[in-house]
Image (tube, rainbow, N blue to C red):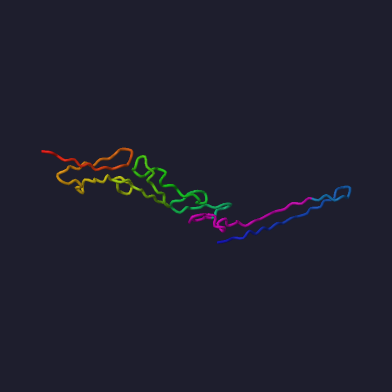
Amino acid sequence: MVSTLFVLMLCVLIRDLDSNLTAASVWFCCCSETDIDECASNPCQLGGTCTDLEDGFHCECFPGYSGFKCETNIDECASAPCMQPGSNSCVDGINSFSCLCSAGYSGSICQTNINECSSIPCQNGGTCTDLVVSGVGMRMTGCSRVTV
């Protein structure tokens, strides 16, 4: 609902005559105004919902946004949710994030260590060893031949 500002201004001139018959004038005004709908200008940004208050407004932000007028995209990557130490593997979205997993890892936050040996990559009787190089994010599969 859009309200229009109505101002009723009543100004009264009071003239008093002093004992010397010179005029002394005093002005005073009384104002009355109707509340303005501060939501009429759609101040809330990025899908926020405005609630008109007396002498102000409040924005209820769409999930993923914050700020007085919902002007800030919350960085869901700020808490480093992806389990890839030392890498920049998080991609911020709106009220979401996604992780770019290094080779050898999977899952929504890269929490699962993929066993590359499960595909039995070694041939001719070789033994597969699934190796992780710490801090670098590299994965290696080592094959060694067992001699009898």
State yes or no: residue 47 in magenta: yes
**Front in this rendered view, residue 123 or 132:** 123
Residue farthest to the bottom?
1
Tell me where the magenta segment starts and ends, as one range. Answer: 26-51
Residue farthest to the right?
20
How far across and down, in percent of the image, does residue 45 sit? 51, 54
How far across and down, in percent of the image, does residue 13 sit? 78, 54
Number of callouts: 0
The answer to whether 41 appears left or right of 11 in the picture is left
Quadrant occupied by the N terminus: bottom right
- Asked which quadrant contains residue 136, the reply is top left
How far across and down, in percent of the image, does residue 133 sit? 29, 39
**Front in this rendered view, residue 72 or 4:** 72
The answer to whether 93 appears left or right of 69 in the picture is left
How far across and down, in percent of the image, does residue 130 sit? 23, 42
State yes or no: residue 105 in magenta: no
- Asked which quadrant contains residue 147, the reply is top left
The answer to whether 43 appears left or right of 13 in the picture is left
Residue farthest to the left?
148
Residue visible at 33% across and 38% down in the picture: 135
Quadrant occupied by the C terminus: top left
Residue visible at 70% across and 57% down in the picture: 9
